[in-house]
Image (tube, rainbow, N blue to C red):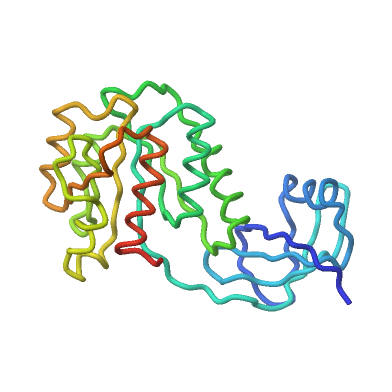
């Protein structure tokens, strides 16, 4: 009987029965040296396309662990298409946003540069690593994609015609988020979406006007309290999921 090992790993290979998957050096180190894996230990594998597969440790080399794919344990299923476009914040808090957005079902993370953004550099590779780790832990079958930062104006200039925008305006001019979203026609609820979150100082008037000018924008309120940018992002995703997502 195989020894169970409660761990899941994201890989970028196709997953097929009886295939041998060689893990990256980082994953191999983690399994062999941190988790003390032994041949026969069970591991879950997913790649964002083929569902989840049960595998077992087949070989342990000095810098490479090989896993034998056994059978599919979960089928791939569709998820809502939701982008989180947010102004970058300090390192620990941007890690938090990447992790929690992944757990809450965001499909794409897009840092945006605004007039009041005060973070000069965004490590998108670190964001991607946080997203992968969160997906492994929360039993999600996909991992959000991460794009390089883009200026807000450029993002809006090429906005897809079919993607709706949930704009959390701090002036409280919109309906409460859950109410506004729940009242939308079904075809809009089923569309691809984006949530736009500003920097700590908020969007300036020009930026707010540009977002509102998009015909796909739904202006909502997150309530009477002033929220930090990371708190606002998590609150907004939760409200969106409860109204039009897959909760």
Relative horizontal placement of residue 110, taking residue 55 as reference (left or right):
left
Give x and y (percent) for residue 147: 41, 42
Give x and y (percent) for residue 159: 21, 48
- Seen from the viewer's position, the closer of residues 172 and 79 is 172
Residue at screen point 34% across, 27% down: 200
Q: Residue at x 84, y 51 (%)?
A: 32
**Total marks placed:** 0
In screen coordinates, is 61 left or right of 133? right
Image quarter where the N terminus lies is bottom right
Residue 162, quarter of the rendered image:
bottom left
Q: Quadrant of the C terminus?
A: bottom left
Quarter location, residue 179: bottom left
The answer to which image quadrant residue 107 occupies is bottom left
Rendered residue at 59%/62% (across/down): 139
Vertical order, 196 against 193 (above or below): above
Give the residue displayed 46% in from the left and 55% down from the top: 104
Coordinates of residue 94 in the picture (x, y in percent): 48, 35
> In the visual, does 160 lie left or right of 44?
left
| Residue in front for this viewpoint, 82 or 25 | 82
Give the percent coordinates (x, y) of residue 157. Answer: 18, 41
């Amino acid at each position: 009987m195989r020894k169970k090992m409660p761990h899941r790993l994201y890989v970028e290979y196709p997953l097929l029965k009886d295939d041998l998957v060689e893990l990256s050096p980082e994953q191999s180190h983690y399994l062999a040296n941190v988790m003390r894996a032994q041949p026969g230990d069970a591991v879950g594998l997913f790649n964002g396309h083929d569902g989840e597969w049960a595998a077992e440790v087949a070989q342990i080399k000095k810098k490479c662990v090989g896993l034998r794919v056994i059978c599919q344990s979960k089928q791939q299923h569709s998820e809502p298409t939701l982008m989180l476009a947010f102004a970058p914040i300090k390192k620990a808090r941007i890690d938090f946003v990447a992790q929690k957005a992944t757990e809450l079902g965001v499909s794409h993370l897009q840092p945006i540069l605004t007039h009041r953004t005060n973070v000069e550099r965004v490590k998108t590779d670190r964001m991607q690593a946080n997203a992968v780790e969160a997906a492994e832990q929360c039993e999600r079958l996909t991992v959000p994609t991460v794009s390089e930062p883009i200026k807000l104006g450029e993002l809006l200039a090429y906005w897809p015609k079919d993607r709706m925008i949930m704009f959390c305006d701090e002036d409280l001019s919109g309906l409460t988020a859950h109410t506004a979203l729940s009242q939308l026609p079904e075809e809009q609820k089923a569309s691809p979406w984006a949530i736009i979150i500003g920097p700590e100082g908020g969007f300036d008037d020009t930026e707010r006007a540009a977002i509102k000018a998009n015909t796909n924008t739904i202006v909502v309120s997150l309530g009477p309290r002033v929220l930090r940018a990371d708190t606002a992002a998590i609150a907004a995703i939760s409200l969106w999921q409860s109204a039009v997502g897959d909760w």
